[in-house]
Image: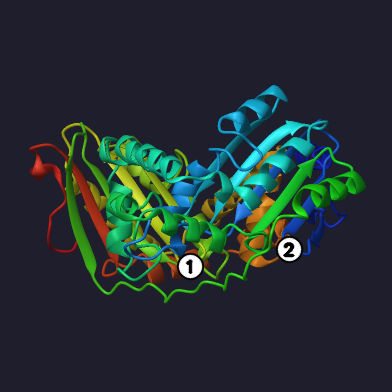
Amino acid sequence: MKRLLILMILACGTALAGDGHLSLPYIRWTLPNGLDVILHEDHSVSTIAVDVWYHVGSAREKPGKTGFAHLFEHLMFEGSQHVPQGKFDEWLEAAGGDNNGSTTNDRTNYEEVIPNNALALPLFLESDRMGFLVEAMSPGKVNAQRDVVKNERRENYDNEPYGLASLSIEENLFPENHPYHWPVIGSMEDLASASYQDVVDFFRKYYVPSNATLVIAGDVNVDTTKDLVETWFHDVPGGPAVPPQAAPPVFLTEQKRVVLEDRVQLPRLYIAWPTPPVFAPGDAEMDILAAILAGGKNSRLYKRLVYELQVAQDVSAFQDGRRLASIFEIVVTAREGHRLREIEKLVWEEIRALTTTPPAPREVERAVNQIEASFLDRLESVQMKAELLNMYVAATGNPDYLNEDLARYKAIDPGDIQAMTATYLRADGCVVLSVFPLGKPELAAPKEGRP
């Protein structure tokens, strides 16, 4: 099996040293306007991934002026000075490529995957909207995209079963002045009241070369690619430096209990805690803990709640790693005829068990193996490798942080998991949210009291 994995890694352009050291080889340079460029060669495929990260997400917004980063995810596809409206997708599709964009609390990214003979096209398209989007914007375009975002909010949150749960958790987990207090999609009231000049100013402040990283991965020639990047991005105006962002540590000193009535069939329990930022000490341990609790049918919560007692329909746990602070979350959907009161009690029993006795070594080993397998899966795609290079450079300053990332999981022992469980999964420092069907509040966990 190990021999097969080594061959797979070598085939996808990722170096593996004799000591088992994983690496994502790259070339990196900076244009005079401040654009950070990273290039990774992978000649095992005939495609190229172009991935642009703007280091701006909803966390860069201010109370009363939220939703701008996500709004620009839409506006960036509405045409720029030399790209008529509707032509961005049309031209890429005609060349055999596709594209996407996404927004998080910490960044906005835009990506294209194209055949190896069409690299100039996405570079032209990305450079034009980076440098010349405002020239093609208008109050009418902004208003139209505000309406699109409002519809997206209705579809994905307001009218989606359990859709308001994540918004309620962030609102209760983070204080009002914290950049993660408001949702990525923003407030509809804020978007409606924002002026056209507010939107333009946000773009000119954050969507500048010095606040962006361009990653190109795949079947590329280094010299040709450097020339193409210089050709298309040299005339994009630079902008003022965006200062690093910081936020005070999040530490809850109480258990917040929240209930939501929703158009759902089954009640669902959410328990969420603030945890260390991504790549900070403790972050990897929380990933392992999530796998031990709910990572597959052999995990503790799945075995007890779903398989043995059959009180739950499904269960999940995850560490939502973010730059300023993370969220550890356990989510359990009750089976018909069962209440969240009994499910919450069982969840806390499993958490307490891990605070008093460390997990078995085989549990930790299984979790590490699952995580290592996910690393290898991501290395099969040039698109995912481009994403990894961008993620690593944004979070650590080192694009090739692959080996260090994996090593932090392999260094964890059962005692570390016990310590992190006791430190972070405190009953007096979390948000307990019950989502219950219309007219059935008796199915929710208690509004008051501790387990």
Q: Quick one: 440 or 204, which is closer to the camera?
A: 204
Q: Amino acid at mark 2?
A: Asn
Residue displayed at 37% across by 55% down: 195
The crowding category of the residue bearing disc 1, from other C-alpha atoms within 10 Å (few below 14, some 14 to 19, many at least 20), is many
| Residue type, label 1 | Leu
Which callout, 1 or 2, points to the residue nearer the camera?
2
Q: Is residue 211 left or right of residue 172?
A: right
Residue 249 screen position, x and y as percent:
42, 75
Q: Residue at x 32, y 34 (%)?
A: 155
Looking at the picture, the colour scheme in use is: rainbow
Question: Is 335 left or right of 243, judged from the image as shown?
Answer: left
Residue 149 image offset from top left, x and y in percent: 38, 41
User: Is disc 1 placed on a helix, strand or loop?
Assistant: loop
Instruction: Quickly name the residue at label 2.
Output: 33
- Displayed quadrant of residue 5: top right
Q: Quadrant of residue 160?
A: top left
Q: Nearer the viewer, residue 372 or 188?
A: 188
- Helix or strand or loop: what does disc 2 sit on? loop
Q: CA distance from mark 1 to mark 2?
A: 28 Å
Q: Position of residue 341 (x, y in %)?
A: 17, 49
Q: Quadrant of the N terminus?
A: top right
The residue pinned by badge 1 equals 324
Q: Which residue is farthest bottom?
A: 248
Q: Residue furthest right?
A: 223
Q: Is residue 265 above or below residue 6?
A: above
